[in-house]
Image (spheres, rainbow, N blue to C red):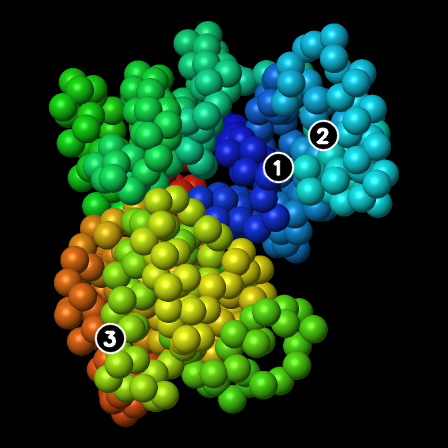
Amino acid sequence: MPQIYFDITEVLLYVQDNNTLSGIQRVALELLRQMVEKHGTERIRVIGFHPVLERVICYDAGYFSNSFTFEADRFREDFDRSLTLSQYIHKRYGRTWKAPLYWLGKGLKNFATRGAYFKRRRIGGGKRNGPKTTKLVQTEDFRFQRGDVVFVAGGTWDLTNHNAFLAARRRADGIVIIHCIYDLIPIVAPEHVENILCSRFLAWLQHISQNADGFLTISAATKVDLDSWLQGHGVVVNSRVLPLAHQFGNARRTLTDASHRGRFDPGISAQIRNAARLPYVLCVGTIESRKNVWALANVWKSLYERLKDATPRLIFAGKHGWLKQDFDNFLHGTGSLYGYIRVVDRPSDADLEFLYRSCLFSVYVSYMEGWGLPIGECLWFGRPVVCSNVSSMPEVGGSLVEYADPTSHASIEAAVSRLITDVDYRERRAAEIAAAHLRTWGDVADDLWSELNAPGG
């Protein structure tokens, strides 16, 4: 039987500079954990391209057993992703005669800041001589066999060397390469993306379309966009849909109400407890233009003018993203709508679970998505959702959510206003959600396993 190689290169690159995961990395690690738990490690291997060592490393898949939880510092250490000072200088400045001066300067800055300078830049203490735990085994001299399947779980548009490596091994070794495609937003909605990413994404898609045996898209909407692009460029590569889950990580689907908001939980940050002390509506995701955050803030201003102190707080939970100057200007000009809007930067998984469980409902009126994880996650905890009626979002929400036109402030306001003012309706919807069958990560992993073991990958 062929080996399944689960490629987490994009995850390893992302965590080098981030302490919390965004959607793509969450999906990749959850699917890997589920597959290892269900099928063991005999046929599953994990690979990743190391940008400093400039080679692909094979890791023990057993690391991602059911007991796996993501903790950034430990993950970086276990996967050798914290750079030594010499590696950091080489990566940032290249090979230069000034390296000893940089080395001395950085060391003095770290001494003056009592270690904070290195910590912020993910610089480790010394030279690495192998795995940091007995559980994680690294193999640098592994060999592919003909028919082995490589599943690339994340976008690798910034990883030219790795993409070239896979293409070369496909030609030489006869491996099967399957890419997971999350969205084509840099191509179909470039107004929401920085120029440099649009260019890199297009070059990446052109490359992998010539060096892949198949694509798995996370929604039917993404498949439509991908197939249209492939057809327009004369490329024939099969694509199939792998719908994602509603489930939030390992969280149990137990329903709660807002009464636990005032209880102390040491796992919840003070920032979260303070933001959630008032009744609130939740908006989860990267805070950027595509998420329609400026329009939603203006809707909240209109609600406040009508409802006054009966207006619930609106909490944006996510990291700061691109092209949101209009949103930032709004918050600055209105004093974050007099405190009725609060931004929570990079919440942990524990913080997010708390926020989902305690919200009146969530709102997600994005212009375009590959899937829309926060829609399903809020449903998982039994709370109602208002979301956009376009792109992939109806695939996630089905009949369980309230829909709005993301281009119409009036449509968004009507949908959220009903859930704010009609408490009986809101809780009836919550009861319907609680009784509904929702898709788990185990379901997705089962479908993925079938796809990767199908003839030809």
Q: Which callout, 2 or 3, points at the residue further toward the start of the chain?
A: 2
Measured as percent of width and height from the top left, residue 358 is found at 47, 79
Q: Residue furthest front?
A: 333
Kind of residue at disc 1: Gln
Q: Which residue is the site of mark 1? A: 16
**Residue 88: x and y, percent?**
70, 26
Decide which of tag 1 and tag 3 comes sooner along the chain: 1
Could you tell me the amino acid type at mark 2?
A: Leu
Q: Which residue is mark 3?
A: 302
What is the quadrant of the C terminus in the image?
top left
C-alpha span from label 1 to label 2? 9 Å
- In percent of width and height, residue 370 lies at 30, 46
Q: Element under label 2?
A: loop
Q: Are marks 1 and 2 in contact (CB under 8 Å)?
A: yes
Give the secondary structure at mark 1: loop
Residue 83: numbered disc? 2
Crowding at mark 1 (Cα within 10 Å: few <14, some 14-19, many 20+): some
Q: Residue furthest bottom?
A: 424
Helix, strand or loop status at disc 3: helix
User: Which residue is found at the position 63% from the left and 68% from the top?
Assistant: 269
